[in-house]
Amino acid sequence: MEKLAATEPLAFKLADVIGHNRIAINMVWVLICGFLVMFMQAGFALAETGFTRAKNAGHTMGMNMMVYAIGMLGFWICGFGLQMGGSGGAASLGGGALLNQEFVINLFGKDFGLWGMKGFFLGGDVYDTTVLTMFLFQMVFMDTTATIPTGSMAERWTMKHFCVYGFFISMFVYPLYANWVWGGGWLSQLGANFGLGHGLMDFAGSSVVHMTGGVAALAGAMVLGPRLGKFRADGTANAIPGHHIPMAIAGCLILAFGWFGFNAGSTLAGGDMRIGVVAANTMLASAGGAMTAMLYMWMRYGKPDISMAANGLLAGLVAITAPCAFVTPIASVCIGAIGGVLLCMSVLFIENTLKIDDPVGAISVHGVNGAWGMLALGLFADGTYGDGANGVKGAVTGLFYGDASQLFAQLIGITTNIVFVFVVMYVFFKVSNKFVKMRVAPEIEQEGLDMAEVAVIGYPEFSINKTHR
């Protein structure tokens, strides 16, 4: 470029403008997609509140609002640094090479990256346009994870303990696993180090975002216990209907809209024409999930359960989040359709067999289908995209197209997520409960959490009927 500037100044200026515009287009694309993902917070708030009872509406909405602020601050303090501090940035956004310090251990002659060591508080030399753009985009992904357990633990969780949880998952748990997959850590290097495909591949977060949230939701719901009256003396479950199904369905549709930013934005490049494939696959999988969930409940119980169909829509979206860039439209519909059936089976199994109370089905939507999405990538990736991903030549190819090693990498990632997230979060909930009480008093749970926990009543003019046992 220096030689070109000296000998061909016009050509140099033209190249500079083209390069600047390319990066600017990519940056605007990533920011807009980040804004779409942020709007998913409204979808989560409406869906979770609609699927739960009126007496807790203010509290449930409050958790969904405050997890955005709490999670953002925790991620700013150290979460982003742990996740992306050694990632090297993103070439499509103009660099970010200032994120260049990863804590690495050497085993078997191979380097295993464990966490980043730069970018805390976004201070010092990482005060950079590329880095801050990446922070915004990565933060809204993290906040989706942090929101998921608010659904499984709704209607009996104290606000104080929720705040402690919000900082813990955003500062430590999510960033560490995300580093291993997206920050240059050891799972992403399974291909380069051990020949397992391209290493763990998760295009937009079936495991990083959704499995992490779903497994944390499982640990939290187990420690917290079921809502009062959920299970009869003989162990059978009582149905506790949500108070506002139109609100819940509107929330699910908002989530589906924001998901286009979630998945297509993960190209990190508006100039990457694969965004059309990603968006179309995302849409098709959601339809497959909604349809099969509705049909499953229709055939089993004689009527279509529209609330389960709405969750089936989300299940299909969760399942396609990892493989969306690597599979065909036919595969996308199949992945979503299987996700819808898995959702229904999982909800019934968790409630009736495991006796775990999950008011909104978060464990099944995000945890179970996050794992299915990771497997689906290892099965259906068709070898048409992903050349050079994680430093491995060639496109990403799954078992059905001739590469079994990618499936092994996916299985290692799923196992790692379940073990790491569940153990850490279960211990966290158990230990933290000794210092900050997790569960509200029975009389508060019976009355409703709104006034006692967040000093507002979601529906002050409602007359809520109460029964006494």
Image: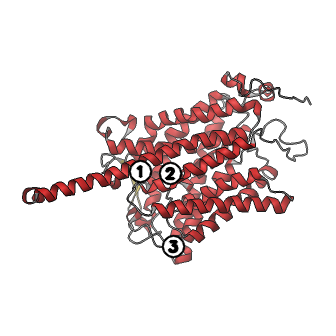
Residue under label 1: 29
Q: Is residue 239 above or below residue 54?
A: below
Q: Amino acid at mark 3?
A: Asp
In the displayed structure, does residue 246 sit left or right of residue 8?
right
Residue 8, compared with residue 228, is above or below; it is below
Residue sticking out furthest to the bottom: 402
Query: What distance separates the C-alpha of mark 1 from that of mark 2?
Result: 9 Å
Q: Which mark is residue 382?
A: 3
Residue 223 appears left or right of 38: right
Mark 3 to mark 1 CA distance (whole Å): 26 Å
| First in sequence: mark 1 vs mark 2 | 1
The answer for how far apart the CA atoms under marks 2 and 3 are is 23 Å
- List the residue tagged with mark 2: 261
Does the CB distance between marks 1 and 2 fall below 8 Å? no
Q: Residue at x 52, y 46 (%)?
A: 37
Q: Residue furthest left?
A: 7
Q: Amino acid at mark 1?
A: Trp
